[in-house]
Image (cartoon, grey):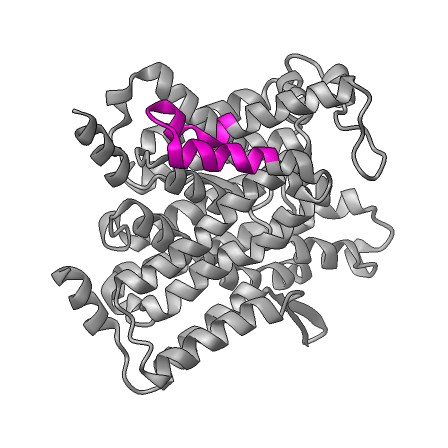
C-alpha cells in the first residue's frame, strides 16, 4: 500500500478529486500564493489597479481553460514582457501625449496591448491551418529546451532581489519547502509552498513583535494596507484607448510573448508528461492566451501570460489536475472583490516570496534541461551546441532587451524574444534539423 502511494507521488496526480475537496482547496490556495507576488508587482510598477489585475488573472485563467478544453493546468498572471512598452509610452510628450500624466497615458498603452493580442489569434490561425507538427519543426527541443531554461533563469534575479530583503526569512521558506518536498508524506509533500510560506510568516510575526527589523532597518511586517482596505469593493475598471504610436510600440513585444507561450506550454507538457502542443493543440492554447490578453487589457489590466511560477508548483506538488488551477482562479476573483484580504496577503514579506522563488524559478530551468535530456538531443552535433549557446547567451546577455528606431518609433525586443528569434533562425538555416529524429526517440522511449 505504501509503495502504491509512493508511486502516485512519483508519477503525479492527474485527478485531484481522489484527494477530496478540502485538500483541493488547499492546493488551489497554494497556486494562488505562488502567482500573487509577481502578478501584483506589474500593476505596482505601471500604476494599474491591483484589484483589476487580480480579477482578470482569475477570469482569463478560466477563459484559457475553456479554449484549451480544460486540459492544460496553466495559470495566467501578469506579463512582465510589456513593462518596457509602458515605460516608453509614459515617456512620450508629443501629439496626444503632450501634457498627459503617466496615469492618463495608461489607456493608450493598454490599447497597444489589445492589438498585440490579435497577433496570438493570427499565429493560432496559422498553426491551425498548417498543423502544429509543421510549425513545431521550427521549434524542436533544441530550441524550446533552452528557451524554457531562460524563462526560469531570467526570473532568477527577481527572486534573489526579493530574498535579499531578509535572507533569514528567505532561507526558512526555502528550507521548509525542500524538507517537505523530499522527506514529507501525504499532503505535506504536495503542499510544500503553502507550508514554507506559513512557517516563514509565523517566524516573521515573532521577529516583528520582538522588535527585529530587516537588515536595511525597515519593518519586517507592514499592516498599513490591511488596516486601510475595505472589506468589499468593486475593481476600478479602465477602458483602453487606441493610438498608432502606442500600437507600434506594443505589438512587436508580442513576438516575445508568443515565443514565451510556446515555451511555457512545452514546459507544462514536459512537467505533466503530456503533449499539449498536439492535444488540445497549440492553436487552442494560443487562442485562449490571445483572447485573455485582449480581454484583460481592454478593461484596465496588463497582458496576462501562462505563469512559470505555477509550473514550478506543478513540479513540486506533482498534482497536475487543471481543476486545482481553476480553484486558484476563483480564489483570485474573490480576492479582487475583497480589498481587505488583498491587504492582509500583502503583509507577507517579499523576502519570503523570494525564498519560495528560489525553488520555483530553478524548477522551471530544470524542466528545460529535462526536456533536452528526455528528447535525447544530440550535443555531439556542432549545430545543436551552436543553437543552444546562442539562445542562452542572447537570453542572458541582452538583459535590457534591444531597442531600435523604426520610422521615428522606438521598438523594444526583450531578451527572450531575441533568444527565440535567434534559435528559430539558426535551427532553420543550419543543416541537419533533428525534429523528426527527436520525435521518434520520444515515441520509442
Q: Is residue 180 magenta?
A: yes
The number of numbered discs placed on residues in the rendered structure image is 0
Residue closest to the far left: 444
Is residue 290 in view from this perspective? yes
Q: As drawn, is 98 to the left or to the right of 384? A: right
Q: Give the answer, above or below, for where 219 lies relative to 304.
A: above
* Residue 125 image-quadrant placement: bottom left
What secondary structure do most residues of the magenta stretch adopt? Answer: helix
- At horizontal 25% and vertical 52% (from top left) the residue drawn is 275
Q: Nearer the viewer, residue 314 or 112?
A: 314
- At horizontal 28% and vertical 26% (from top left) the residue drawn is 16
Q: Position of residue 208 (x, y in %)?
A: 76, 22
Locate the N terminus and report the quarter of the image it occupies: top left
- At horizontal 73% and vertical 23% (from top left) the residue drawn is 207
Q: As drawn, is 50 to the left or to the right of 124? A: right
* Residue 96 image-quadrant placement: bottom right
* Residue 253 image-quadrant placement: bottom right
Q: Position of residue 75 (x, y in %)?
A: 44, 39
Q: As drawn, is 48 to the left or to the right of 323? A: right
Q: Position of residue 440 (x, y in %)?
A: 16, 67
Q: Nearer the viewer, residue 43 or 325?
A: 325
Q: Position of residue 11 (x, y in %)?
A: 24, 40
Residues drawn in magenta: 172-195
Locate the C terminus and report the quarter of the image it occupies: bottom left
Amino acid at each position: 500500500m505504501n509503495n502504491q502511494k509512493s508511486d502516485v507521488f512519483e508519477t503525479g496526480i492527474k485527478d485531484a478529486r481522489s484527494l477530496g475537496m478540502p485538500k483541493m482547496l488547499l492546493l488551489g490556495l497554494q497556486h494562488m500564493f505562488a502567482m500573487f507576488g509577481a502578478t501584483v508587482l506589474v500593476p505596482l510598477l505601471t500604476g494599474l489597479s491591483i484589484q483589476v489585475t487580480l480579477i482578470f488573472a482569475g477570469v482569463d485563467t478560466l477563459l484559457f481553460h475553456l479554449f484549451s478544453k480544460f486540459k492544460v493546468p496553466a495559470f495566467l498572471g501578469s506579463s512582465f514582457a510589456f513593462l518596457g512598452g509602458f515605460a516608453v509610452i509614459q515617456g512620450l510628450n508629443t501629439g496626444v501625449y503632450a501634457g498627459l500624466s503617466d496615469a492618463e497615458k495608461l489607456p493608450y498603452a493598454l490599447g497597444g496591448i489589445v492589438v498585440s493580442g490579435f497577433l496570438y489569434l493570427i499565429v493560432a490561425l496559422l498553426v491551425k491551418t498548417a498543423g502544429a507538427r509543421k510549425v513545431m519543426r521550427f521549434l524542436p527541443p533544441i530550441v524550446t529546451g533552452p528557451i524554457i531554461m531562460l524563462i526560469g533563469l531570467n526570473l532568477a534575479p527577481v527572486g534573489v532581489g526579493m530574498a535579499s530583503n531578509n535572507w533569514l526569512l528567505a532561507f526558512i521558506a526555502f528550507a521548509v519547502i525542500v524538507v517537505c518536498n523530499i522527506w514529507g508524506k501525504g499532503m505535506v509533500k504536495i503542499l510544500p509552498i503553502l507550508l514554507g510560506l506559513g512557517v516563514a510568516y509565523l517566524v516573521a510575526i515573532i521577529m516583528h513583535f520582538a522588535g527585529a527589523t530587516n537588515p536595511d532597518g525597515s519593518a519586517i511586517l507592514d499592516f498599513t494596507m490591511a488596516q486601510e482596505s475595505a472589506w468589499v469593493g468593486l475593481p476600478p475598471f479602465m477602458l483602453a484607448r487606441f493610438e498608432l504610436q502606442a500600437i507600434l510600440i506594443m505589438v512587436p513585444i508580442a513576438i516575445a510573448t508568443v515565443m514565451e507561450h510556446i515555451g511555457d506550454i512545452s514546459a507544462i507538457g514536459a512537467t505533466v508528461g503530456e503533449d499539449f502542443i498536439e492535444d488540445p493543440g497549440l492553436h487552442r492554447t494560443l487562442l485562449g492566451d490571445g483572447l485573455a490578453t485582449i480581454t484583460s487589457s481592454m478593461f484596465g489590466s496588463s497582458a496576462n501570460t501562462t505563469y512559470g511560477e505555477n509550473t514550478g508548483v506543478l513540479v513540486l506538488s506533482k498534482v497536475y489536475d487543471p481543476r486545482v488551477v481553476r480553484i486558484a482562479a476563483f480564489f483570485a476573483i474573490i480576492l479582487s472583490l475583497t480589498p481587505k484580504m488583498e491587504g492582509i496577503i500583502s503583509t507577507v514579506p517579499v523576502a519570503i516570496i523570494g525564498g519560495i522563488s528560489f525553488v520555483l524559478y530553478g524548477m522551471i530551468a530544470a524542466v528545460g534541461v529535462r526536456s533536452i535530456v528526455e528528447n535525447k538531443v544530440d550535443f555531439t552535433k556542432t549545430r545543436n551546441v551552436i543553437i543552444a549557446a546562442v539562445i542562452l547567451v542572447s537570453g542572458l546577455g541582452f538583459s535590457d532587451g534591444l531597442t531600435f528606431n523604426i520610422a521615428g518609433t522606438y521598438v523594444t525586443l526583450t531578451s527572450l524574444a531575441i533568444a527565440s528569434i535567434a534559435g528559430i533562425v539558426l535551427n532553420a538555416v543550419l543543416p541537419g534539423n533533428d525534429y523528426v529524429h527527436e520525435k521518434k526517440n520520444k515515441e520509442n522511449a
